[in-house]
Amino acid sequence: MLDAFSRAVVGADAKGACLGSADLASLRQHVADANIRIDATNAIAQHISCIAADAVSGMVCENTGMTQPGGNCYPTRRMAACLRDGEIILRYVSYALLAGDASVLDDRCLNGLKETYDALGVPIKNAVRAVEIMKAATVAIITNTNSGPSAFQGISGKGSDCQGIAAEAASYFDRVISSLS
Amino acid sequence: MKSAVTTVITAADAAGRFPDISDLKAVKVSFDRAAARMEAAEKLASGIDNVTADALKAVYSDGKYDLATRDKCARDINHYLRLINYCLIAGSTGPLDEWGIAGVREVFRTLGIPTSAYIEAFSYIRERVCVPRDMDQQAANEFKDLLNYLINALS
């Protein structure tokens, strides 16, 4: 697993060179934006079920047959597995966002996920739809454009500073979607 | 690769929890120290050849070590300083542990290399760091902490 700092270190070691002034500019920016990154990660962690469970429920609402006999979320044991997976994917996205690097998501979550879902007969189209809803909800919460309670009440007070970090979070969800598709 | 942030994430993942307040605080603390660490890393990177040459001169000044080993010793000192540069960036001893310390005792023992020469070199570098000529106090502390860590590992 790498973060933005160790990613720079591994890159420099491959060349056998020290990390000097030229390499440090982007890391200094990363440090300058640390509070935004931490607030955004916290915003996800404070809204776990709002993001994950609602996304799975939303996906099921769009495909009501899923909870009927013969559907992929019938009986409740399989619905529970689906809810759990939504939360696991969101958890690894939150790690990737905190680290500023996708490697934790790739190594520990996405590696082999599609093969597992194919083997278990999970409908990929529906899984992707749930991730898309999670992405939209996460972006809305981080940028403070959600309709529910504000994630930044009393913290930074505004979501407009968070466009960049929201786009980064969205890119991790896109990574999940492309690895499943 | 272990770094300040990945250590926190590894612990959270082992427990299966989202990053909680104490995880985020730990990350915040490491970010707060990052400016000093980066300053030390930057100064070290720009002066690494001079620092190596200085330390080498000090180690070989009294004829205790065979001059034939001089070039290899310079290479190793440079290598360790580069790993310290990485540790300063990563905010963790991960790069030193994984690339510089794991297995080093066995290698040195097998090849009959005296670690005392390295310890003298790094101690010399530690004593020579001058505040504020070379770097800020906080940056110097971060640098010296890593030098001490390496000296202890080689002792």
Image (cartoon, coloured by chain):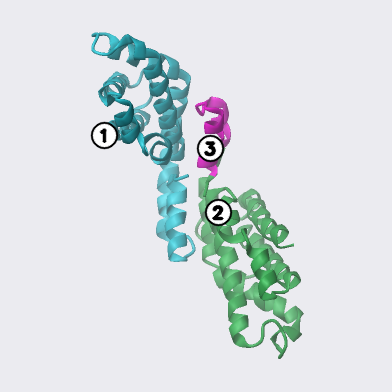
Chain colours: A green, B cyan
B154 vs A140, nearest the viewer:
B154
Q: Residue A82 at x, y = what percent?
A: 62, 76
Instruction: Establish if B100 lies above or below A156.
Output: above
Secondary structure of the residue carrying numbered label 3: helix
Residue A50 visible to an observer of this rendering = no
Instruction: Establish if B50 lies above or below A37.
Output: above
Query: For the residues tagged 3 and 1, is the chain the same?
Result: no
In the displayed image of the protein, which residue is found farthest to the front? B110
Residue A55 visible to an observer of this rendering = yes
Task: Residue under label 1, please give it.
Answer: B152
Q: Residue B54 at x, y = what percent?
A: 35, 13
The C terminus of chain B lies in quadrant: top left
Does residue B56 appear to the left or right of B13 in the view shown? left
Q: Residue A2 at x, y = what percent?
A: 52, 46
Task: Residue under label 3, please give it.
Answer: A10
Residue A143, quarter of picture: bottom right
**Quick check: marks 3 and 2 in contact, CB under 8 Å?**
no
Secondary structure of the residue carrying numbered label 2: helix
Measured Cα–Cα span from mark 3 to mark 2? 15 Å
Question: Local crowd at mark 3 within 10 Å, few (<14), some, or many (≥20)?
Answer: some
Q: Point out the stretch of residues depicted in magenta.
A: A4-26
A174 vs A112, nearest the viewer:
A112
Secondary structure character of the magenta stretch overall: helix
Residue A36 is marked as none
Q: Residue A39 at x, y = what percent?
A: 52, 55
Residue A104 is marked as 2
Measured Cα–Cα span from mark 2 to mark 1? 32 Å
- The residue lying at 64 percent from left, 64 percent from top is A113
Q: Amino acid at mark 3?
A: Val
